């Protein structure tokens, strides 16, 4: 630990020399261990951070520098990734295997990054193996700087609400099933902040308003969230202030985050918080409690019902979520200052998901390519010019219609290009897609096959700006992205078994420039593995 701490201190000093020390910095020390957990009433091997399941929240403010020292006390390599945190100019710290060497057992690694020009609600998670099915996740909140206006009053309280489907089996058992080329069965239940039915409560005082930061940290299921007798005012989506709209219930697709305001304006008692699965005939449901401080009694009546398999209900809700153009984001200027609808995309990338067998084993693919990891993180191979690790454009930028095959899928793109990406879902499940390093404008989604005529219905004025989008069955979703962040960025399904079995790729946003204005150099404390072993990061 001592040597790692010294190396981390040197790296921190250099980091501040690069990014500027005028912004505050926050230090975190995390010890990652196994521990017994009982979320659905049976003992499981969980992944704990500082003894906690879920892990501790990260509280920060726009432009803070985060120094997170992670000590791996597991018996296998480990990494943490930061969903929605853009890692500006710094994909080395993204914490997925395509960018970052795993932390070996008994070793530590210090993540050093800035939450540059961001606000909002996000989460972190373990990215290797099938660790996400064991815990190791937690909430991230990035508050606005004191002088930046926020389009609602400060709430009386601010709660992280991590919801997700869950298996009773250990993560090692689930991984072994996938490694044999088999599918996983339907999840066994749903957790709220790591607890099963009625295992969690949120305390409120009558007449006051509270912020709930809801993230779906699960493995496959879209979830509907609702509170008995209370409306929710949606105010923020993955770092974007949205037009404030009341909802009785909210679909939160896997990997997505929302902030809602809830006012305790009902008679003083306990009320059900309900989370249930969507779009499958088998419905899992769990409950928590909204508890008034002067409660006159326990919950009463049945938990409120919600939508089940209805697609149109969810699609209409998604279309109703729009950016608040006059509100400030992380900077004082209005969010609508960037007129994305006036820019013609320089390129269209169409990505089609598929499922099938390769060598008798279940695999999942994008444009017929089922991703297999290389022996060296792709970003390190790129930095050190190590040949033979991957090929740029080893995946087509449009559907090929061919059978599934295995490759390390890397799609090349030009720095500062403005592009259109269309996700095409010919399957009969709801998909959820996430792009590291970026937020994007969701300009359109609809049923059927996407064509160029589909652009006639795009929202070119106030589309929501976020990093994770759903794609409905037999449907498409189109996004616009300004590629202003150099690096190697994971583009993946949030359906975790599918990601593990190949439904992901890396977007290599490239420039020949070596200026610090475009990309930071490799961290001094970067772990080196695979064919990068023995290389030198850089002198201090």
Image (cartoon, rainbow, N blue to C red):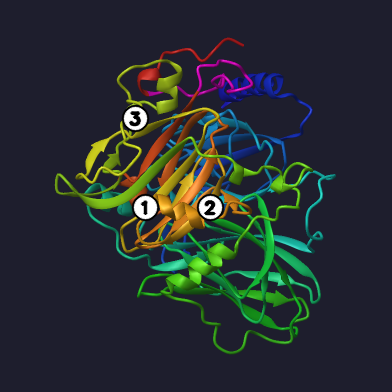
- Marks 3 & 1, CB-CB < 8 Å contact: no
In the picture of the structure, the residue carrying the numbered disc 3 is 393
* Residue 24, above or below 399: above
Which mark, by number, is residue 424? 1
Query: Is residue 38 visible in the rendered structure shown here?
Result: yes
Q: Is residue 104 magenta?
A: no
Image quadrant containing the N terminus: top right
Position of residue 527 in the picture relative to residue 52 (left or right) = left
* Residue found 47% across the figure and 52% down from its top: 455
Which mark, by number, is residue 51? none
Image quadrant containing the C terminus: top right
Position of residue 143 in the picture relative to residue 77 (left or right) = right
* Residue 52, above or below 166: above
Mark 1: give few (<14), some (14-19) or many (20+) Cα within 10 Å.
many
* Residue found 76% across the figure and 31% down from its top: 23
**Residue 243 pos. (x, y %):** 69, 61
Q: What is the spatial separation of the Cα atoms under label 3 and label 1, in whole angstroms?
A: 19 Å
């Amino acid at each position: 630990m001592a040597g790692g701490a010294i190396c981390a201190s040197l790296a921190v000093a250099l980091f501040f020399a690069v990014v500027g020390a005028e912004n505050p910095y926050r230090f975190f020390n995390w010890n990652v261990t196994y521990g017994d957990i009982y979320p659905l009433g049976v003992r499981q091997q969980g992944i704990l951070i500082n003894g906690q399941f879920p892990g501790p929240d990260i509280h920060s403010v726009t432009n803070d520098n985060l120094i997170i020292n992670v000590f791996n006390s597991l018996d296998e390599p480990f990494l943490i990734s930061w969903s929605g945190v853009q890692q500006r100019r710094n994909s080395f710290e993204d914490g997925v295997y395509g960018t970052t060497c795993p932390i070996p057992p008994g070793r530590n690694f210090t993540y050093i990054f800035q939450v540059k020009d961001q606000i909002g609600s996000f989460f972190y998670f373990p990215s290797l193996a099938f660790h996400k099915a064991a815990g190791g996740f937690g909430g991230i909140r990035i508050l606005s700087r004191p002088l930046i206006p926020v389009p609602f009053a400060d709430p009386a309280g601010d709660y992280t609400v991590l919801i997700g489907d869950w298996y009773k089996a250990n993560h090692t058992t689930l991984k072994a099933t996938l490694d044999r080329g088999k599918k996983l069965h339907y999840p066994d239940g749903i957790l709220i902040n790591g607890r099963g039915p009625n295992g969690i409560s949120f305390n409120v005082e009558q007449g006051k308003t509270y912020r709930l930061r809801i993230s779906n940290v699960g493995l496959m299921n879209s979830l509907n969230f609702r509170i008995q007798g209370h409306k929710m005012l949606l105010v923020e989506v993955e770092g974007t202030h949205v037009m404030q709209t009341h909802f009785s219930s909210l679909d939160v697709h896997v990997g997505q985050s929302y902030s809602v305001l809830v006012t305790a304006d009902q008679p003083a008692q306990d009320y059900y918080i309900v989370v249930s699965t969507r779009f499958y005939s088998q419905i899992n449901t769990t409950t928590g409690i909204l508890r008034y401080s002067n409660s006159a009694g326990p919950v009463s009546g049945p938990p409120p019902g919600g939508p089940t398999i209805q697609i149109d209900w969810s699609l209409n809700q998604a279309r109703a979520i729009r950016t608040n153009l006059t509100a400030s984001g992380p900077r004082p200027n209005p969010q609508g200052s960037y007129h994305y609808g006036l820019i013609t995309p320089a390129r269209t990338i169409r990505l089609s998901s598929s499922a099938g067998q390769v060598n008798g084993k279940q695999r999942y693919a994008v444009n017929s390519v089922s991703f297999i990891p290389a022996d060296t993180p792709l970003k390190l191979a790129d930095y050190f010019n190590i040949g033979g690790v991957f090929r740029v454009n080893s995946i087509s930028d449009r559907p090929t219609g061919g059978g599934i095959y295995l490759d390390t899928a890397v799609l090349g793109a030009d720095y500062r290009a403005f592009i259109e990406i269309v996700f095409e879902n010919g399957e009969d499940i709801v998909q959820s897609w996430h792009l590291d390093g970026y937020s994007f404008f969701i300009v359109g989604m609809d049923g059927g096959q996407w064509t160029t005529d589909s652009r006639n219905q795009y929202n070119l004025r106030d589309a929501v700006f976020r990093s994770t989008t759903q794609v409905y069955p037999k449907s498409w979703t189109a996004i616009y992205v300004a590629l202003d962040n150099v690096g190697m960025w994971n583009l993946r399904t949030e359906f975790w078994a599918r990601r593990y079995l190949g439904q992901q790729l890396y977007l290599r946003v490239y420039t020949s420039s070596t200026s610090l204005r475009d990309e930071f150099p490799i961290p001094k404390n970067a772990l080196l593995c695979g064919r990068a072993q023995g290389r030198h990061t850089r002198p201090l």
